[in-house]
Amino acid sequence: MGSDEASSSSRWSAAFAGASIDSMQIYDSVVARLFTPWAHDLIGRLAPRPGHAALDVACGPGTVTHALADCLGPDGHVVATDISPAMLEIARSKSTGTDSAPIEWLESPATPLPLPDAAFDIVTCQQGLQFFPDKVGALAEIRRVLRPGGRAGVAVWTQVEDQLFGYLRDAIANVMSGETADRYLGPFLLTGEDAAEYARRAGFANIDMERVTLPAVLRGGAQELFDTLPASGVAADIAALHDNQRAQLLAETVRLAEGAQEGTSLSGSLTASVLILS
Ligand SMILES: C[S@@+](CC[C@H](N)C(=O)[O-])C[C@H]1O[C@@H](n2cnc3c(N)ncnc32)[C@H](O)[C@@H]1O
């Protein structure tokens, strides 16, 4: 991992860890909708069974966690960890179904996990690995807590050019600076191949990787993309903008995304490398 990648990722991790509930709520209202089909895709690949125990690492607003709890049923058990108290508060506030597995929420970095060895049938980590300072260590922790025969599902975005979020990166470059745009890239810098290599170093023997593209629609258009910035690695830069600069940045995002606008919605896709590890 290059030093630029490391500093961009750690900036995002720090932004998540210190984010306010307000900025995370805005983020959640956009991102949870975009991430829900991805949660179902990842869980489907792991084929969980009722009564299984599952761990969701870097659970964020709980999109994968709640879907897992619904799959595992009342005899199952789900633990969810995240470094951000604001994310955990939002995740915890969402209601769970009466037929869902109980969920235990833990504030914790990805390494070390405050959990016993061989405790889980399934571990998920959706769009979290790219932010962890010690990626091999985090994957080794995931492996440590998996039962023999258990499986982990890890998803990381491919490059920003493949994503709806690319409009934001370009708008930041045009209105702010190329350097600020580079600092926006944290979620999109870890390749699937590198993630697979880290998993191998962490001791996983079976590593299946697939490049997956799913449609992404933002009903509120480019404004919704823009609304994710307060919970990004450039949150401090955005907060420091004057109102007219912020308006300029939004206008540039709208202009760049014009071709993807369908009525009031923005339509595009997201692409990730999805790894199944055992
Ligand atoms: C893009 S969000 C993904 C959240 C969730 N998995 C989902 O699919 O919606 C990334 C999450 O990683 C968490 N995170 C960042 N750095 C972390 C670290 N070092 N340890 C644990 N969690 C971390 C953030 O707080 C955030 O909730």
Image (tube, helix red, strand yellow):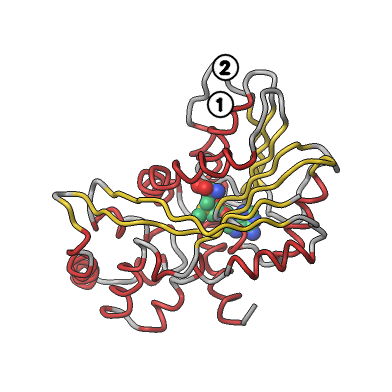
Q: Residue 148: x and y, percent? A: 85, 41
Q: Nearer the viewer, residue 272 or 170?
A: 272
Q: Residue 225: x and y, percent? A: 31, 57
Mark linked to residue 131: none
Q: Residue 272: x and y, percent? A: 50, 58
Q: Quadrant of residue 69?
A: top right
Q: Which residue is mark 2?
A: 99
Q: Quadrant of residue 54?
A: top right
| 10 to 129, vertically: above or below | below
User: Label 2 crowding class (10 Å Cα cut-off): few <14, some 14-19, many 20+?
Assistant: some
Q: Residue 193: x and y, percent? A: 63, 69
The answer to whether the residue labelled 1 contacts the one labelled 2, judged by CB atoms less than 8 Å apart, is yes
Q: Which residue shows up at 79% across the image and 66% down it? A: 201
Q: Which residue is mark 1?
A: 70
Instruction: Return the residue found at the far left.
Output: 263
Q: Quadrant of residue 205?
A: bottom right
Q: Which residue shows up at 44% across the image and 78% down it? A: 182
Q: Which residue shows up at 56% across the image and 81% down it? A: 4
Say what secondary structure mark 2 lies in.
loop
Q: Amino acid at mark 1?
A: Asp
- Mark 1 / mark 2, whichever is N-terminal: 1
Q: Nearer the viewer, residue 4 or 88?
A: 4
